[in-house]
Amino acid sequence: MSIEIANESGVDVDTDAVLAVARHALDEMGVNPLAELSVLLVDVDYMTELNHRWMGGDGPTDVLAFPMDEGSVDHGPGENAAAGGEPALLGDIVLCPEVAAKQAAAAGHSSADELHLLTVHGVLHLLGYDHAEPEEEREMFGLQARLLASWRSTRSR
């Protein structure tokens, strides 16, 4: 699994943990091990610009996911690799640590925990999950909680 991360946010972030939770989520979801993902951490101004340009939103948001090619996402373990296909370019996850810190304070947990949650959230969006409808939200948020719990249990061993 090729995951690149760039921290351009100006905030000190444990990027190794962000990479680890992204890798865990992709592994647990059975994504092709040759898949590629990019994670970018940005400041409030840049996230505000991205949110406005791509989502029509006002102000900064916590996470944005930009799928590369939804048709190439491999939901099954090793299907593309076995067929000699190209690895899936999943896309980009953009995180804003400053927004995450505010949400973490409101939720009563650490900024790191919030960034891990948002990373898994972004991965699920890249894999085609959404939360626009109540049923979709239940499925996505339930899966998100299970992935985070399993990742945390592997870290505490």
Image (cartoon, grey):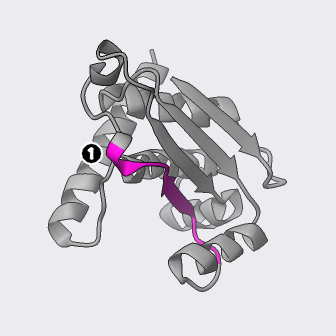
- Circle 1: element type: helix
**Mark 1 neighbour density, 10 Å: few (under 14) some (14–19) many (20 or more):** some
Q: Residue furthest left?
A: 135
Front-most of 139 and 81? 81
Which three-letter amino acid code belongs to the residue tagged 1? Answer: Leu
Q: Residue at 32% of width from left, 23% of height from top? A: 80
Q: Residue at 20% of width from left, 54% of height from top? A: 139
**Considering the image in quadrants, where does the C terminus appear?**
top left
Front-most of 13 and 79? 79
Which quadrant of the structure image shows residue 3? top right
Q: Is residue 152 visible?
A: no
Q: Is residue 16 shown left or right of residue 43?
A: left
Q: Which residue is mark 1?
A: 143
Residue 134 in the image: above or below residue 145: below
Q: Is residue 58 visible?
A: yes
Q: Residue at 56% of width from left, 49% of height from top? A: 92
| Residue 67 drawn in magenta | yes
Q: Residue furthest right?
A: 10
Count of all numbered marks drawn on residues in the image: 1
Q: Is residue 62 shown left or right of residue 8?
A: left
Q: Is residue 46 shown left or right of residue 32?
A: right
**Magenta span covers which residues?**
60-71
Residue 104 in picture, x, y percent from top left = 56, 59
| Residue 77 drawn in magenta | no
Front-most of 30 and 87? 87
Residue 111 in picture, x, y percent from top left = 62, 52
Residue 114 in picture, x, y percent from top left = 54, 52
Q: Residue at 30% of width from left, 61% of height from top? A: 130
Which quadrant of the structure image shows residue 42? bottom right
